[in-house]
Image (cartoon, rainbow, N blue to C red):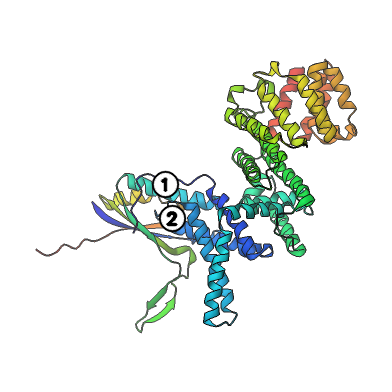
């Protein structure tokens, strides 16, 4: 088994103006997804990210607020999961509940660098 | 980093809606009823925080307490920010802060939460608001429904609901309605309005065949939840409140058996009584018993007794029609409305025959206009004429009813009756 990172991008929930009932429904879908991944022993963990952030960039580095030019593309959080292959990991990502609100999942294998013998 | 749960975790149905109502009520005690927008924003922020954290697999053991805690902390934050603006010494600031936390915590005690919710119900049911606005505001503020959900439930548009809520809030602000439980005579007057609003809410869910099943069910359940809330508070536990709650239980017990597949109406005489919810019927009797104290017989007592009478009969044939007629006579004394007269005449038809019933309907004050405007009158009268063998009159009235109703289910039922005539 290899470790993979799911990186979630999508609109911030606060911009969606959800009613209490809709919030609960949205959350329930996430539990079910995590539940499914856990049942298959694929879920390792995950954490949300704060919306506020800084960017440090440039050849003479400057610090700016951001990188939130595109609100819809906000990096919202990540999961670490286990899978046999990148293909399986991508299959598992199909369970992500926020495709309908234009969210996306970037699936990346976490590289294990072997110690030289 | 959290570890994943073994089983998908499940929140109690409508937890967020119910918690929204609680939080709005409590925070209104803190910020005042003129600051409803600030209150609702704070509640919204609390849910966002939950959504953000819980989504990643960290469901707290007691979600309800977690939400309340976040709302409480946010409240204290907001107050602290206000106090900072006041240029006070550090010493005084610290003392004020301690006493603020103390005072705010009082509002978050369970008994105080119940009290605040009752105050909110009373505020939304202020007699100076019109009934449409009372219902919309109650659903939004007490029940945590979204505007779109209210529009679906009340068969209205989002902008119309938006307007009603806005109008009601402006009124509350301009009149500075007290966020208190009225006392003495004013309490009983206000309770009557609350009963009316809850009954309206229930009937919107129970009778509107146009809205979808799910939202109608939600509406009935919500009316029952609020009525129960009322009966659990020492100032709301009036006999009439128990009577209303028992009436809702009896009616709701037939919820599923009234509508067949493909949304057709199943009439009382044809319903499968095994499908009635017997747990709800049992609760109905329990609350009816609890309502039988005091010396006042409210219309809810009588209507509940009527509903109970139907639940009592094992089949349509063994309905105790003379007991029902007696109850309708009582009801008519207190509520001499055309629709009560109409329903009473249906009972008379069973006891004395259709001709007596037809005469009674034709004697209803204003019947000419009613027959032209409300489908239920020509539908019932047309049915009686059909049973009396007067096919022409029956056809004319049933067709009239057909044009008056916009419900497909009712149209279908009328169509079947029309076909049976020819």
Q: Is residue B250 above or below residue B416?
A: below
Q: Callout 1 environment at 10 Å: few (<14), some (14 to 19), or many (20+)?
A: some
The C terminus of chain B: image quadrant = top right
Q: Which residue occupies the foreground of this view, B75 or A31?
A: B75
- Dot 2: what SS? helix
| Residue assigned mark 2 | B54
Q: Chain of mark 1?
A: B
Dot label at residue B28: none
Q: What number of labels is visible?
A: 2
Q: How far across and down, in percent of the image, does residue A28 sit?
A: 46, 48
Q: Is residue B380 visible?
A: no
Q: How far across and down, in percent of the image, does residue B282 sit?
A: 60, 29
Q: Chain of mark 2?
A: B
Q: Callout 2 environment at 10 Å: few (<14), some (14 to 19), or many (20+)?
A: some
Residue under the point 56% across and 56% down: B109
Q: How far across and down, in percent of the image, does residue B118 sit?
A: 66, 51
| Residue assigned mark 1 | B9
Q: Is residue A58 visible?
A: yes
Q: Would residue B364 appear left or right of B420 to someone viewing this image?
A: right
Residue under the point 57% across and 30% down: B279
- Dot 1: what SS? loop
Give whichever of discs 1 and 2 has the lower sequence position. Answer: 1
- What separation in Å lies between label 1 and label 2 (alpha carbons)? 10 Å
Q: How far across and down, in percent of the image, does residue B71 sit?
A: 53, 61
Q: Would residue B412 appear left or right of A20 to someone viewing this image?
A: right
Residue under the point 86% across and 26% down: B361
């Amino acid at each position: 088994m290899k470790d993979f990172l799911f990186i979630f991008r999508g609109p911030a929930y606060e911009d969606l103006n959800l009613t209490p009932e809709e919030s609960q429904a949205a959350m329930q879908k996430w539990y079910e997804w995590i539940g499914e991944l856990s049942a298959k022993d694929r879920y390792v963990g995950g954490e949300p990210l704060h919306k506020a952030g800084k960017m440090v960039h440039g050849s003479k580095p400057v610090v700016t607020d951001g990188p939130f030019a595109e609100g819809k593309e906000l990096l919202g959080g990540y999961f670490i999961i286990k899978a046999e292959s990148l293909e399986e990991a991508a299959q598992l990502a199909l369970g992500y509940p926020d495709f309908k609100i234009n969210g996306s999942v970037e699936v990346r294998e976490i590289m294990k660098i072997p110690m030289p013998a | 980093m959290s570890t994943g749960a073994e089983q998908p975790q499940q929140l109690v149905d409508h937890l967020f809606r119910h918690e929204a109502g609680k939080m709005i009520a409590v925070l209104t005690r803190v910020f005042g009823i003129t600051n409803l927008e600030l209150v609702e924003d704070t509640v919204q922020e609390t849910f966002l925080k939950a959504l953000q954290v819980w989504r990643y697999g960290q469901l707290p053991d007691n979600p309800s307490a977690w939400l309340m805690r976040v709302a409480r902390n946010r409240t204290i934050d907001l107050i602290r920010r206000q106090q900072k603006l006041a240029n006070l010494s550090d010493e005084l600031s610290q003392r004020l802060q301690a006493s603020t936390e103390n005072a705010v915590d009082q509002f978050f005690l369970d008994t105080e939460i119940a009290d605040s919710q009752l105050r909110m119900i009373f505020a939304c049911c202020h007699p100076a608001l019109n009934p449409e606005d009372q219902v919309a505001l109650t659903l939004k503020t007490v029940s945590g429904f979204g505007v779109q959900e209210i529009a679906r439930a009340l068969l209205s548009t989002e902008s119309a609901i938006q307007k009603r809520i806005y109008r009601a809030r402006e009124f509350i602000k301009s009149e500075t309605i007290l966020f208190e439980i009225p006392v003495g005579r004013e309490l009983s007057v206000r309770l009557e309005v609350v009963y009316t609003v809850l009954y309206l809410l229930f009937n919107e869910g129970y009778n509107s065949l146009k809205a979808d099943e799910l939202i109608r069910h939600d509406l009935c359940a919500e009316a029952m939840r609020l009525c129960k809330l009322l009966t659990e508070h020492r100032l709301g536990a009036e006999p009439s409140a128990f009577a209303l709650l028992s009436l809702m239980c009896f009616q709701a017990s037939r919820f599923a058996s009234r509508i067949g597949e493909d949304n057709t109406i199943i009439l009382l005489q044809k319903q499968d009584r095994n499908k009635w919810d017997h747990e709800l019927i049992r609760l109905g009797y329990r609350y009816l018993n609890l309502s039988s104290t005091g010396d006042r017989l409210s219309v809810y007592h009588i209507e509940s007794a009527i509903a109970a009478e139907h639940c009592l009969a094992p089949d349509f044939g063994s309905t105790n029609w003379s007991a029902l007629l007696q109850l309708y006579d009582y009801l008519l004394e207190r509520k001499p409305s055309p629709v009560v007269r109409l329903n009473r005449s249906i009972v008379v038809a069973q006891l004395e025959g259709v001709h007596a019933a037809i005469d009674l309907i034709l004697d209803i004050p204003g019947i000419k206009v009613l027959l032209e405007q409300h489908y239920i009158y020509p539908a019932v009268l047309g049915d009686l004429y059909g049973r009396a063998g007067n096919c022409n009159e029956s056809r004319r009235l049933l067709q009239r009813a057909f044009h008056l109703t916009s419900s497909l289910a009712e149209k279908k039922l009328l169509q079947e009756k029309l076909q049976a005539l020819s």
